[in-house]
Amino acid sequence: MPILLALLLLIAPPSAHAAVPLTWNLTPATWPLTPDTRAQISDTGTARFTVNGVTIIHRRAPGDLVVANLYLLGGVRLTTPATAGIEPFLLEVSSRGTRRYPGDQLRRAMARTGSGIGVVPHEDYTIFGLRTTQARLDSAWSIYTDRLLHPTLSDADIAFVRENRVAALAQRGDDADARLDYLADSVAFAGHPYGLSPVGTDRSLARITPEELRAFQKDRLVTSRMLLVVVGDLSRERLTTLVRRAFGTLPVGDYTWTLPEPITERVGSGVHLVTQRLPTNYILGWWSGPPAGHPDVPALRVATAILSGRLFAEVRSRRNLTYAVEARFRDRALTSGGLYVTTTRPEETLRIMREELRALQQMTIPTEALSPLIQQFITEYFLDNETTAAQADFLAEAELYRGDFRAGERFITDLRAVTGEDVRRVAQTWMKQLRFTYLGNPAIVNRFTLLSF
């Protein structure tokens, strides 16, 4: 037992820890909040308020930088296989011109501000973000909101963006990891909205019509879908004025944010074998976890990091069976986790990975032995919180997934409360029934080996 514990506490090198993104643990909630719970809250310079149905979280942060992230809620739940990726597609077309800044005028105006506008697709929402400075906020905000509210959406611009995006997505097949990630999602989450890609597919983007884009822009642009998170040193009065001028005439709509339904029934086979001539074989399997703020999530983070470290030590360092192996933890409204490896000897590698998972599920690590790992998590948490953009994301996740932007304050407390028994229990409860996608030579792997996890 002492030897096994010592090995567990080797944990993992930085590359393995990077597989466990460190963001707030969050719990289920319905959003927007009720009037009683939406009362003005202000702590450490952060407040939440509403302007014309737009929920705003504003964090006063010193400095010249201003970050405004608009979270357009719904994500893949607003699409079908035929329309997957429609919102990011629409927002990218908006970069080709607007009512106030047609054609190249938009790019020239944006260049003068020295600011940036970005689109980040996500399964739960689409982020339309602005990065600017205090001095350029008014002019950059004008361009930013005109792109959202009044894009030209000409047939020529739609065709241009479509061609580029379809070509980029078609090239996904040329990158083994990119293809594996896409296929593994469609297999592991078949029958669930998370089985759809937030960026879409080459097929879905090829068939979305200009009329569908314009209808989506008209029908889905309501303030009840909007969560605006602003981090920067500007007054609430100035921010309120900017929002009211931009969104004051938009309909509120009747959209209500709720967490996606849990995965209760599996659709299709739990193993997907794909033949592709490659120098090695790529394997990725996902298990389905609880909602992002479930009490088990902190222990699942710790358990995943321990497993990732043990896989690295046994499969890569000791056995030299791969150059890449890890356990993954995925932050979404519904969490998930998985096992990833590339190897030329899949049967032997999978056997060792299964043994390491079983060991985690069967033994109880002394709670005091978890302290070094938890302290590293906490250190990385503070490092990850240094950027203004990261603060905006953390505030949004806390608000959406837990119903209170302050929920992240409990992150450290929750981590430190994790016990060795918690780690064993969550590994037994959640790290099971993995659904695998295998890319490479199926002749050298037994599908029942993959089904045994």
Image (cartoon, rainbow, N blue to C red):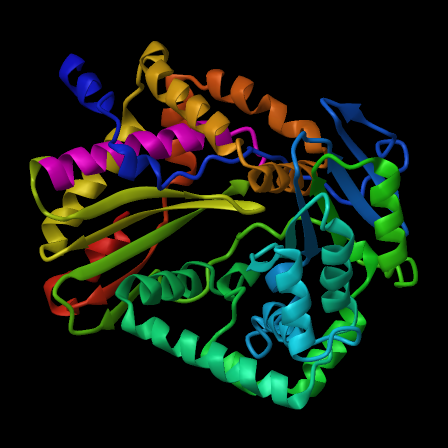
The residue at the point 36 percent across, 26 percent down is: 424
User: Which SS does the magenta portion mostly show?
Assistant: helix
Residue 270 on image: x %, y % = 35, 60
Task: Classify the position of the N terminus by image quarter.
Answer: top left
Residue 53 visible in the displayed image: no
Residue 123 on image: x %, y % = 56, 57
Residue 435 on image: x %, y % = 35, 56
Residue that extends furthest to the front in the rendered view of this protein? 112
Residue 379 visible in the displayed image: yes
The verdict on residue 314 being magenta is yes
| Residue 146 as seen in the image, left or right of residue 347 | right
Q: Nearer the viewer, residue 209 or 248?
A: 248
| Residue 228 as seen in the image, left or right of residue 410 | right
The residue at the point 72 percent across, 37 percent down is: 403
Q: Is residue 421 above or below residue 231?
A: above
| Residue 227 as seen in the image, left or right of residue 17 | right
Q: Is residue 378 above or below residue 23?
A: above
Residue 295 on image: x %, y % = 55, 28
Residue that extends furthest to the top in the rendered view of this protein? 368
Residue numbers of the magenta segment? 292-317
Q: Residue 428: which quarter of the image?
A: top left
The verdict on residue 377 being magenta is no
Q: Residue 35: which quarter of the image?
A: top right
The residue at the point 41 percent across, 58 percent down is: 188
* Figure disc tally: 0
Residue that extends furthest to the left in the rendered view of this protein? 319
Q: Is residue 272 above or below residue 325?
A: below
The residue at the point 76 percent across, 54 percent down is: 226
Q: Nearer the viewer, residue 328 or 397?
A: 397
Q: Is residue 85 above or below residue 365?
A: below
Q: Nearer the viewer, residue 234 or 105?
A: 105
